[in-house]
Amino acid sequence: MTVLDDFTKGDSLLNPWMDEWKKQGKKILGYFCTYIPEEIIHAADILPVRIRAKGCTDTPMGDAYLSPTTCSFTRCCLEMANRKQFDFLDGIISCNSCDQIRRLYDNIRYKTPFSNQYFLSVPSNVNDITIDFFKYELNKFKNYLEKTFNVDITEEKLKNSIELHNKSRTLLKELYLLRKKKNPPITGTDIMNILLSGVSMPKNQFNELLTTQLKEIEGKEGISDDKSRIMLVGSMLDDPEYVKIIEDLGGLIVNDAVCIGTKYFWEIVDENLDPLDALANRYLSRVSCPRMAGEQSKRVDFVLNLIKEFNVDGVIFQRMKFCPFWWAEIFVLRDELKKQGVPFLDLEREYVLSGAGAMKTRVQGFMEVLEGK
Amino acid sequence: MIVAGCDVGSLTGKAVILKDGDILSQCIVPTTPKPVRTAKNAMNGALEKCALSLDDIEYIVGTGYGRVKIPFATMETSELTCHGKGAHSCIPEIRTIIDVGGQDCKVIKVNKDGKMLDFAMNDKCAAGTGRFLEVMAKTLELKLEELGPISLKSNSPAKITSQCSVFAETEVVSLMADDTEVSDIVAGIHDAIAARIMTLVYRVGLEKEVVISGGVAKNVGVVNYLEKRMGMKTMALPVDPQIIGALGAALIANDKAKSQ
């Protein structure tokens, strides 16, 4: 029994940590996007849990209400909501991540409303005015939580929450930096399980587990039987099985630019500022998702830097079908990588893993390209 | 030294046997629901033609969709590498290979040594593949091999805009209802396939010389409309374009056997 076995429990809708939390009579709120600050929810003594559609196999209702040409993640979520699979949540928090997530919220609110639901408005560009506006929105959100759950979110509570979440981020980054080694001590599949646990369990417990994990692998001999070092870039991905297919073919994932990965934790929140100011600043200025306008060159640089720093052999783009943000983003990234001479593979996917055979052919072909270099 | 390559594709299974690098025999069989059986059928067919048995073969490389299920293969390689190697061995000037198979379509870029540098494959969709042509031939009550020559008779190809083979069929049905000339419909279908393949060509980039491999390369219509869209002629392969994957696999087997 290692810590990693513990982390695999995070790859399910409900897990022992959530059960324990609920037994204490405490609330759980589901949230949809990395732009929603967990800190504020935590400061209300509520467990923030990232909404996933784990276990969804088909989407007849999702297709009927959202049309088959919306991204499969939103359709799977709607299916799960309609099938009462999210009833363990005491409410949901959504935001305007993209139009599809926004309309998913509208649809859930109309068809299968939760007793508590809140929509956070997140600006789509970054400047002093939008950061001010976002602070105002975050304050409104804080007031909503205080009123709805009858709690007092003090400045001290917010500061403690920021500190706790920063600790998480720092530990995750420490873990990621170990992958810079010639023989990284951990696979991308294990990392995915760790990340998934991180967004579905109390942060203090997560930090404890992660600290133990770091100690456990510190002196461990690294992985040396891989063929290539791969960076994973693209749409919302929360499927360890998907990562495992790539790694089983010899492509060791050494870092990523996906929303549950680096985009979630790479930058910390300034602990010296007023908490809401600091949160508004960090969440809008962090390395962005393609929903943000005017930030593309920064995102490209972020990917190019990680490729250099982590000695990446090739990039695998995974784009969810009907995810226009990422499709357009990958078009630009492909061009930039070509200029830099970095090989890449462009994979289309659906939220529910299917067509593994076709995926294996492409990944194997890519490994053969990289081997020949 | 006798080696073989076996390519279990979505619509056909192919086997090529090489003796000292030259083709001794080849065989194409229809795919069965079981990849193992398809592989055996293709291999037995090729062995029969040169009166050899499986024991005479020193090294076998499997490729294609069923590659992991080929029981007699010494190793497996993706069909991408195989198509690159197979086509390049026929014509060393080749830099771009467009392979149009049963359910896949791929554009492969190789260097002067035939090493694969880059590739692009169709997403999960059968439009622009052999399966698409089969469905269309059935809808139009034509034989598969009639499609290509008929398409060349058209002066004004019909417009088929749908990106999906199922919806393209619906479009074809409405064109039929409008009494559109069959040759114009068939030409439209071929041009639509060419357009789909061009998407992949744009992704990888076009570098001379170019060949088309795979079963669909035998269709003069697809070749014609693709050449028009690319604005250049493709080179004709000196062997059956459908066996290029199996040939590439056999050549890899030859290299492996040599270095053993």
Image (cartoon, coloured by chain):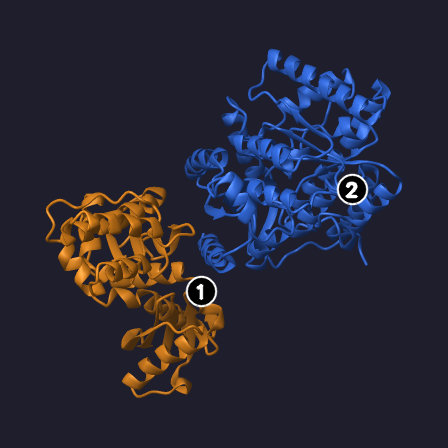
Chain colours: A blue, B orange
Identity of the residue drawn at 60% across and 28% down: A287
Report whether B237 appears left or right of A124: left
Report whether A114 appears left or right of B86: right
Which image quadrant for residue A288?
top right
Residue B91 percent coordinates (x, y):
24, 60
Where A179 falls versus A154 (above or below)?
below
Q: Chain of mark 1?
A: B
Where B60 falls versus A320 (above or below)?
below
Residue B50 percent coordinates (x, y):
28, 85
Report whether B236 appears left or right of B7: left
The secondary element bearing badge 2 is classed as: loop
Name the residue nearer the viewer: A247 or B164: B164
Mark 2 and mark 1: span between their CA atoms? Answer: 42 Å
Name the residue nearer the viewer: B76 or A163: A163
Q: Which residue is mark 2?
A: A201
Identity of the residue drawn at 42% across and 39% down: A338
Instruction: Answer whether residue B92 is visible to the viewer in this image.
Output: no
Is disc 2 in the same subunit as disc 1? no
Q: Which mark is residue B77?
A: 1
